[in-house]
Structure formats: structure tokens, C-alpha cells
Amino acid sequence: MTFDPKRRRFLKAGAASLATLPLAGCFDVAGDRDSTVRKVLMSANDLTYRVQRFLLNADALAQEFPATEIRQPMRPNGVTNPQDADYRALAANDFADYRLTIDGLVERPRQFGLAEIRSMSGRTQITRHDCVEGWSCIAMWTGVPLSYLLQAVGVRPTARFAVFSCFDTLENGFTGPIRYYESIDLRDAYHPQTILAHAMNGQKLPIANGAPLRLRVERQLGYKMAKYIHTITLTDSLAGFGEGSGGYWEDRGYEWFAGI
Ligand SMILES: Nc1nc2c(c(=O)[nH]1)N[C@H]1C(S)=C(S)[C@@H](COP(=O)(O)O)O[C@H]1N2
Ligand SMILES: [Mo]
């Protein structure tokens, strides 16, 4: 089956979980002051990806908060300590030998070391992370805008998606270990708040939250925000990745476009 964003229904998994699950985490999204837009969008189960894009305004910024709103540590979720040998080896050396690879439909595929990424002019943003399980956390993220890295490698005109391949294995399939992966379209990739974060709440990014680099794509749900990234591949089709639906959880039924 080829990937067709128009056929994806809106927030099926997200809306159901946010509405029905107990709120176990940092605070209650239902009581949040800016929930009106969300409620309207969440009720619109049959909106297409294209209509959501229109409603959400491709370039609008996600809300940012003052530091006083950071009330607790960022709650880690999903994989919090990858056991993969290649990851453990890098972690043992505090990621000194880590390289981020950017490949696929780019003019100049290359690798970036952490020191180089940390030295690039970055962005800090205090945003709210909404997990599909029904909890939210406000945290401060510092990183390099993905657009800077994309400019450095030169994205080819045929590219439509950025795919993030991660170190952590979630299960063992028939063909081998299945690692986490995610994808976003180029609109989100170039959005000013889309960053590869290397720091959180003013500290080096902890392993639990995705060290050494994790994605922040602030207008979508938490599962889009790939942790433990080793490669970003520019592509015109999601068919060659995982089961072809654009992400580990998308391959298991979650929406590809998880706008909030
Ligand atoms: N590589 C990887 N990325 C991941 C996950 C994961 O298990 N592995 N879980 C996702 C989910 S469901 C959420 S809510 C966030 C959790 O980020 P946190 O640990 O910083 O709270 O990471 C997302 N990215
Ligand atoms: Mo999540």
C-alpha cells in the first residue's frame, strides 16, 4: 500500500486516549486554558490531513511558556534506556564518537558530530509535550533548528519527508530487530520550532529523554518526537521504511499526522 496522507483519519488514537484514559502524568490537558482549539479539532474525526494542515496554518507557532510554567521534571516515556550495543558503546564515552548522518535526497550527504551541532546557533523553547496516553509536560528544549542542517546538506526538490531512524530496538521481528523510527513532512521539517534538541531544562539531554539528540516537532503529539536519532533520511516516499506507514507507532495504527 502506498502512503496517502489524505486518507488518514484525524487523531483517532490520540483523541480516544486523551478523552478516556486517566491522567497519570504531569498535569491535566482537559483543564488546560487553551484547550478550545484542541477540542474543536479533536471532534473533527473525519478531517483530512489537507484540511488539518489548512486549519492549523502551516507556519503558526506552537504556544511557548514562561520558565515559571516548568513545574516538574520532564516525564520520560517509551524507551528510556536503549540496550542496543551500538548505543551503549556511544553512551559509555558520553557520545564523544556520536555522528548524526543525513542522507537520502540531499546534495551533500554527511555526518555531524555533537560538538559541531552544539556550536551551531540554536534555539531554546519552552513548550508543552502532549503524549497520546493523556499526560502533558512543559519543558525547556535547546537545540539546532532542523532547517539549518537541511540547508547544510542541500535538500533535493523531489524530497517530501524527513525520516528519523533511532537506536532503540522495541521488538524482534521475523527479519530482525525493529527499531523506533518516525517521519515528518518538509513543512514541519522547516518549521522554526522544529529542532534537534541536545539539552533539556538547561542541562545536557538525559538518556531517558533521548540523548544525544531528539526531535521536537511542537505541533504534534509526543510519539512524533523521535529520541536517540542516528540518521535523518530525506525521501519522496515512506514505503521503504518499516511497514511503510511512516513510524513505529503508525505501523501499529496511530495517525501519521498527529496535529494538536
Ligand atoms: N526512539 C524513541 N523515540 C520516542 C519514543 C520511543 O520509545 N523511542 N517514545 C515516544 C513517545 S510515545 C513519547 S510521549 C516521547 C516521550 O519523550 P520523553 O521520554 O522525553 O518524555 O518520545 C517519543 N519518542
Ligand atoms: Mo507518547
Image (tube, grey):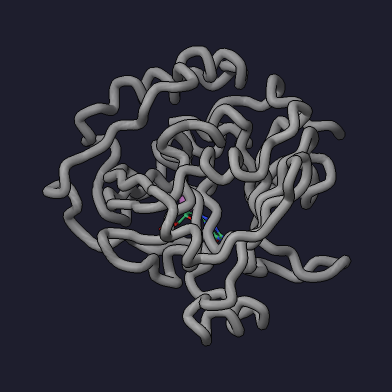
Q: How many marks?
A: 0
Left or right for 136, reference 246 = left
Residue 112 percent coordinates (x, y): 59, 60
User: Which residue is at 22% across, 36% downward?
Assistant: 31
Left or right for 99, reference 14 = right
Question: Can you tell which quarter of the image residue 246 is in?
Answer: top right
Is 207 drawn above or below residue 149 in the view shown?
A: below
Q: Quadrant of the N terminus?
A: top right
Is 258 drawn above or below residue 167 in the view shown?
A: above
Please tell me which residue lies in front, 152 or 90: 152
The answer to whether any part of residue 217 appears in the image is yes
Residue 178 percent coordinates (x, y): 74, 64
Residue 208 percent coordinates (x, y): 43, 70
User: Which residue is at 45% across, 22% downward?
Assistant: 59
User: Which residue is at 61% across, 16% downward?
Assistant: 50
The answer to whether any part of residue 253 appears in the image is no
Residue 46 percent coordinates (x, y): 58, 18
